[in-house]
Image (tube, rainbow, N blue to C red):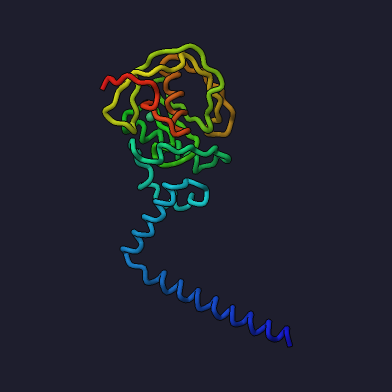
Amino acid sequence: MSRKLKGEGMSKKRRILVVLIVVILLAGSALSGNNVSQLTYAAKEAVQSEGSSATWAANQDIKSQTRQIRYSGDEMLRKKSEIVGVIDDEIRQILNDMAEIMYTKHGEGLAAPQIGILKRLVVIDIGEGLIKLVNPKIIKQEGGQKVRERCLSIPNTLGLVKRPARVVVQALNENGEEIILTGQGDLAKSFCHEIDHLDGILFTDLDIVYIR
Ligand SMILES: [Zn+2]
């Protein structure tokens, strides 16, 4: 008896489930162009606010919209980026996109949060060739230097800041191999500037003398 009642309960639940699925399918097929763009916007917002693996698929779909430079005032620039666990084709694609944007904008470096992706990825080219870094960290620094700095995310701003004269960076390359790089002068400056971005730090946060 009790088993029978249970059985009826189950079939009721199933019916409700079927009705729900039908309603969802009908709603889906009735989506107009406006609704689609609202959904795209919602997906974009999700990517902007989290950048987690859960939103990765959405990120891919709206790649062209998210991979644009974020400017000062954008909260993405203030967030801490996540360590990259697996270096796959998607990560390599992001690094390639970042390099393309950096060259297009005539920059010398770019960090992933600058294009709205909260992952510890950096590209640098100070005229000595392209460097792609995954999960970079400064493991040693020496001396000091006063350097002129600018940032693609803070247009029309140039300032004098103090950076180490020499840094040693440990990172992974795009094939997941560990690399150790030493940078002096401009390269030391770029390593510091870009790695700061991964922790939500901008060069204007430093002790700075504005040139313009
Ligand atoms: Zn910057």
**Relative to the observer, which residue lies in front, 45 or 58?**
45
Q: Quadrant of residue 3?
A: bottom right
Q: How many marks?
A: 0
In the drawing, does residue 113 fall left or right of residue 138?
left
Q: Residue at x 41, y 69 (%)?
A: 28
Task: Residue at the far top: name it.
Answer: 143
What is the quadrant of the N terminus in the image? bottom right
Q: Quadrant of ligand 1?
A: top left
- Residue 161 in percent (x, y) is at 37, 19
Q: Residue at x 59, y 78 (%)?
A: 13
What is the quadrant of the C terminus in the image? top left
**Relative to the observer, which residue lies in front, 42 or 26?**
42
**Relative to the observer, which residue lies in front, 188 or 73?**
73
Q: Is residue 198 above or below residue 49?
A: above
Q: Residue at x 48, y 14 (%)?
A: 166
- Residue 202 in percent (x, y) is at 39, 29
- Residue 83 in percent (x, y) is at 54, 37
**Relative to the observer, which residue lies in front, 163 or 97?**
163
Task: Residue at the far bottom: name it.
Answer: 1
